[in-house]
């Protein structure tokens, strides 16, 4: 059996798929260690996995509380600068495990410490891509949101030049920190992080299905489409009797969330509340931070700080969410029409894919006002085709065993020679 070292970075939607992966590996008898923010230590250990926590919960909350994190323009540079700061911490944590070429290091595209350990110790390396947008096709460019919509009309060579240039925030903010580490370790340094260190040179895995994302010709090859992980901590959470009573007390409600890390969604929840009252529909608001949700809520509304979506999506009529890929995939898995109210990151692209599928609509959060919210809710609820398409997506997800796909891949990794 092999040892798998999993490095994960981001919010719950980024971390939960790696917990899911770690659990699959442990069930197969492998040793698993997860390196992640201390904010997720309890969830990781609750899944039965060993954890090396980095930083403190307060560090995570400080970043999440920065309004720039949710800006379509400023969020990217903010995250890249943060990745550069924590890169040495991930490297030090991994090196404390005394890695060998028989180990397997895994991470997303932005956990560059996994690639660093591959370069230094010869560990086998797997990049798990959680969102289609992060694979960065220039032949089939993703939906970047209104601030960068002009880029969709540029020829592929121009786009490639922009992203591979030294002035791109990815390269400008990340490359110096990683080059410095490589030079200190007497290792060859990448000229630029993108594209040199963006994908594993050995194994790239898409944690989404091909029918959701397509398969542009300039994505890495080989690329395994494993499917959606669909892990939401349901096995670690006790049922909420008050929520159960609310569900039983009336017709199916709308499920509304702005994401687990969001602290600045008060306008989103206030607008949604007003429109739901106008339309006479019930709703469940899922928001970890209470101050975002109107208080007190009217009787036809319920607020939960956290609830596994797999428990309540089958009992809801419409899913209004921020468009994180983990959230969107849960909605698809349960055949629920969606309205994606995107803010930044991968959210506009995921929303555009939901619309292209015909499983819902999407809009930027800055445009989520009462007229637009009412128009979209009425449109999606009033047209049965959205639910029909969502149900077909759910059937596709049921027919593909993502867990078995990942098990088979990891089995091959565990038995293969390092560097093969």
Image (spheres, rainbow, N blue to C red):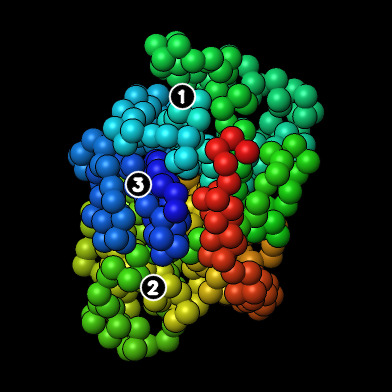
Q: Looking at the image, which is closer to me, 8 or 346?
A: 8
Q: Residue at x 69, y 39 (%)?
A: 220
Q: Residue at x 30, y 83 (%)?
A: 244
Q: Is residue 207 visible?
A: no
Residue furthest bottom as drawn: 249
Q: Looking at the image, which is closer to me, 364 or 225?
A: 225
189 relative position to 29: left or right: right
Q: Residue at x 38, y 34 (%)?
A: 99
Query: Does label 1 or label 3 sit earlier along the sequence?
Result: 3
| Of the two numbered discs 1 and 3 in the rendering, the one whose residue sits closer to the viewer | 1
The CA span between labels 1 and 3 is 19 Å
User: Which residue is labeled 3 in the image?
Assistant: 34
- For the residues labelled 2 and 1, say whether their Cβ atoms are less than 8 Å apart: no
Query: Does label 3 or label 2 sit earlier along the sequence?
Result: 3
68 relative position to 407: left or right: left
Label 3 Cα crowd, 10 Å radius (few <14 / some 14-19 / many 20+): many
The CA span between labels 3 and 2 is 36 Å
User: Which residue is labeled 2 in the image?
Assistant: 283
Q: Position of residue 33 (x, y in %)?
A: 34, 47
Q: Judging from the image, what secondary structure is the residue with disc 2 in? A: strand
User: Which residue is labeled 1 in the image?
Assistant: 120
Q: Quadrant of residue 239?
A: bottom left
Q: Quadrant of residue 82?
A: top left
| Of the two numbered discs 3 and 2 in the rendering, the one whose residue sits closer to the viewer | 3
Q: Judging from the image, what secondary structure is the residue with disc 1 in? A: helix
């Amino acid at each position: 059996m092999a040892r798998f070292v999993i490095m994960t970075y981001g919010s719950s939607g980024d971390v939960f798929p790696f917990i899911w992966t770690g659990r699959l590996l442990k069930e197969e008898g492998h040793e698993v260690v997860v390196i992640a923010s201390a904010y997720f230590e309890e969830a990781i250990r609750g899944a039965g996995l060993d954890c090396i926590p980095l930083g403190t919960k307060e560090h995570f909350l400080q970043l999440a509380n920065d309004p720039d994190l949710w800006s379509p323009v400023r969020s990217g540079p903010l995250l890249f600068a943060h990745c550069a700061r924590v890169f040495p911490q991930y490297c030090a944590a991994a090196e404390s495990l005394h890695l060998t070429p028989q180990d397997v290091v895994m991470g997303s595209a932005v956990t560059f410490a996994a690639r660093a350990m591959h370069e230094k110790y010869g560990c086998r390396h797997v990049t798990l891509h959680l969102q289609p947008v992060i694979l960065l096709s220039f032949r089939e460019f993703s939906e970047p949101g209104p601030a960068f919509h002009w880029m969709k009309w540029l020829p592929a060579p121009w786009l490639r030049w922009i992203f591979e240039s030294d002035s791109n925030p990815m390269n400008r903010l990340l490359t110096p920190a990683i080059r410095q580490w490589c030079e200190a370790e007497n290792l060859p340094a990448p000229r630029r992080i993108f594209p040199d260190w963006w994908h594993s040179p050995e194994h790239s895995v898409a944690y989404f299905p091909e029918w959701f994302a397509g398969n542009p010709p300039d994505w890495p090859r080989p690329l395994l489409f494993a499917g959606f992980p669909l892990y939401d901590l349901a096995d670690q959470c006790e049922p909420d009797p008050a929520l159960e009573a609310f569900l039983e007390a009336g017709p199916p409600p709308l499920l509304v969330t702005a994401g687990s890390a969001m602290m600045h969604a008060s306008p989103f929840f206030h607008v949604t509340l007003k429109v739901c009252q106008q339309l006479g529909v019930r709703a469940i608001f899922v928001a970890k931070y209470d101050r975002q949700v109107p208080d007190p809520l009217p009787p036809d509304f319920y607020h939960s700080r956290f609830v596994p979506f797999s428990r309540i999506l089958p009992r809801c009529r419409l899913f209004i969410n921020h468009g994180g890929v983990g959230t969107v995939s849960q909605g698809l898995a349960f055949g629920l029409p969606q309205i994606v109210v995107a803010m930044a990151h991968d959210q506009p692209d995921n929303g555009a894919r939901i619309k292209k599928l015909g499983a819902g609509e999407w809009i930027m959060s800055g445009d989520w006002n009462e007229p637009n919210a009412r128009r979209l809710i009425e449109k999606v609820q009033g047209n049965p085709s959205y639910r029909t398409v969502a149900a077909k997506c759910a059937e596709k997800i049921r027919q593909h065993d993502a867990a078995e796909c990942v098990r088979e891949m990891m089995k091959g990794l565990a038995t293969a020679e390092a560097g093969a």
